[in-house]
Every structure is written in structure tokens, then in C-alpha cells.
Amino acid sequence: AQAAGICYGLNGNNLPPPSAVVGLLRWKNIRKVRLFEPNRDVLQALGNSGIEVNLAVPNSQLQNIANNPSAAGSWVATNIQAYPAVTFGSITVGNELIPGPQAQLVLPAMQNIYNSIQGAGLGGRIKVSTVVSTAVTTGFPPSAGVFTPQAMPFMVPIAQFLARTGAPLMITVYPYFAYVQNDVVSLDYALFRANYDVVSDGALRYRNLFDAMVDTVYSAIEKVDGLGRRAHIPIIITESGWPSRGRSGGGWRNAKTYDATVSDAWTYNQNLVNHAARGTPKRPGTPLVTYVFGLFNENLKPGAEIERNFGIFYPNMQPVYDINFP
């Protein structure tokens, strides 16, 4: 099975029609795609494509779904059962809501979606999870990783739910932001380019920041009480990427000023795709399903210029740089 996929965001007013996008994905041999919201045209285009879909329940719908099992049932009927030709692999309930004001909604919403998936007879095929950022953990080196006090009350029962249902935890991993926000992180370590051990952690050695960030989360999961033999919850990376243009820095105390380049973006994402099948030092040889963020430069994304320049393609479907998906 292919370990690397792509995030197909729709936050632009000049994006190509979904049928053309599915053709592009197949041409590039991309067989896994993450969608941040259900979209009828996109889901119809993905039918019978052989592309596996990781679909998000948008944050805006969480309150209703957490409080109403019937709302979860209608969401599953409208966005999953209505597309029998689409191969759904997983559903994420809430994106980076822990910790935060909506954190307490995440697990009840996950449970309601899970029950609806089971009720639809799709439980064997579709896993239900949530997405958190690596900011839910703290600790260095990676073996010292724990959930932060703010995240712990939510992450412990979620980890127990994932262990019970055999589902992975979904995380977003951005060495780019760690690099620009921290003056001790080297560019080579962030880009998978270091040819020496940057971090030694007992018997484990780290030559790239991505592995260290992921293994910190694995360590935090393993420290959750009551999981027993099921503490080896898998992880899926729902977003990781590097912008191809824009300046960052200045906003954080230890930030460095960094001008994103096409060359660095290509280096990071190609190395990421190549690396996904290998696993991490903590879980070597276990492929780490990883979704590159993202497919297109999205011109309506708010924030700094970098936010509109994470795509590997321009909206006209010409490559910003050429990534090979094995």
C-alpha cells in the first residue's frame, strides 16, 4: 500500500474542476487524498477512481454532531453512504481542536460518528479519529514525550477510544514552523538533509526533525494508563508540507527570518514522500501514512503569503516543482 498521499484543499476561486483533478492525481500515481470538508462534486469525481479518501467532519459541525446522534447519522448518510463508489478509509472528527474551547466536543462527536458508521455496516472499512497538532505534546528528547496538562484530559479518553476501536491517531506535523520559530533548529535537520545524528535518545538516533516530532507523540500515547497491549496506536500524518514562497519570522521571540524557496519546498516534500514508507526510529519499518499539504496553491487562504503557497501545483495544474510519488 502507498504510504504518501495529498491534501486536496478547496480554498481558492481559480481551482480546476474536480474531474480534472482526479485525472491529475491518477497521472501522478497519488492514491490517497485528504478532504477537509465533504464536497459533492469532488466526491462524485472520486467515485471508481481507486483513490482512498480521508474525509473530515468540519469543526463548524462538531457541536451539532456531538449533541445529536441523529445529526451524526444524517452526516454519514449524506456524505458517506450517498457515495458507494468512493473508497473511504477514514473520517476525522474535528481538526486541531485540542486543547481549546471546543475540545470537550471531540470525543462525543467521534463516538456518534463511529456509531453511525457501525450502524451503516461500514465499521470494518472506515476508521474514525480526530486530528491534533504536535503541540498537544511536550518533552525532549522524543522518549520523554508526554501530553501537555492542557491536552491530557481530552487525549487520554480519546487514546482509549482509538485503542478500543483499532483506529489511528491523526496528527499534523510541520518541521517548517518548528524551524522558523526556533533558532536552534538547523535547516538540514528540518529538510531531511542532515547526514549525521542530530539527536541521540538512548539507542535511538534522529537525523530529521519530522521523526523526532512523530516519535514524541508515540511516546506520549504509550504513557497513557490503561491501554495495555493496545498502547501501540498507529499514527497517520494528515498534514505535512513546506511553503515555496513567502517570508516568515519576527513574530516569535526566538524566530529567525526565513524566505521560503521552491528548492527547499521540493527538498522537504520529496524527502517526506520517500521517507513515509520507512517509519520512524521508534517504529522502524512500519509505513507512516502521510498526506502532503497540499495539492494546489489556494489563493483564498487567509494569513501570511506562505499560507497561499503550500501547493505542489498551481491552479492551472502546472507543477510548482515536480514530486515523484512512488
Image (cartoon, rainbow, N blue to C red):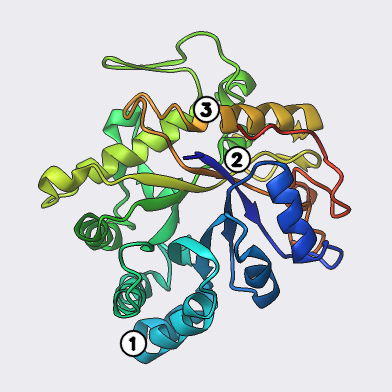
Which of discs 2 and 3 lies nearer the camera? The answer is 3
The image position of residue 210, as x and y in percent, is 49, 32
Residue bearing mark 2:
177
| Residue at 81 percent of width and 40 percent of height | 245
Tell me which residue sits at (20%, 58%) in the image.
160
Q: Label 3's element?
A: helix
For marks 2 and 1 on the same chain, the one whose residue lies earlier in the sequence: 1
Tell me the distance, in whole angstroms, between the alpha carbons under discs 2 and 1.
37 Å
Tell me, yes or no, if residue 300 can be seen here. Answer: yes
Q: Residue under circle 1?
A: 69
Residue 10 drawn at (x, y percent): 72, 65
Q: Is residue 25 above or below residue 114?
A: above
Q: Quadrant of residue 232?
A: top left
* Disc on res. 173: none
> What residue is shown with label 3?
275
- The three-letter amino acid code for the residue at tag 1 is Pro
Rate crowding at label 1 as few (under 14), some (14 to 19) or many (20 or more) other CA atoms within 10 Å.
some
**Upstream in sequence: badge 1 or badge 3:** 1
- Taking the spot 63% from the left edge, 41% from the top edge, the residue there is 241
From the top left corner, tell me how far across and down residue 325 is, in percent: 64, 35
In depth, the one of 87 and 53 nearer the eye is 87
Q: Position of residue 275 (x, y in %)?
A: 52, 27
Circle 1 — which element?
Answer: helix
Residue sitting at the far top: 196
Amino acid at pointer 2: Phe
Type of residue at label 3?
His
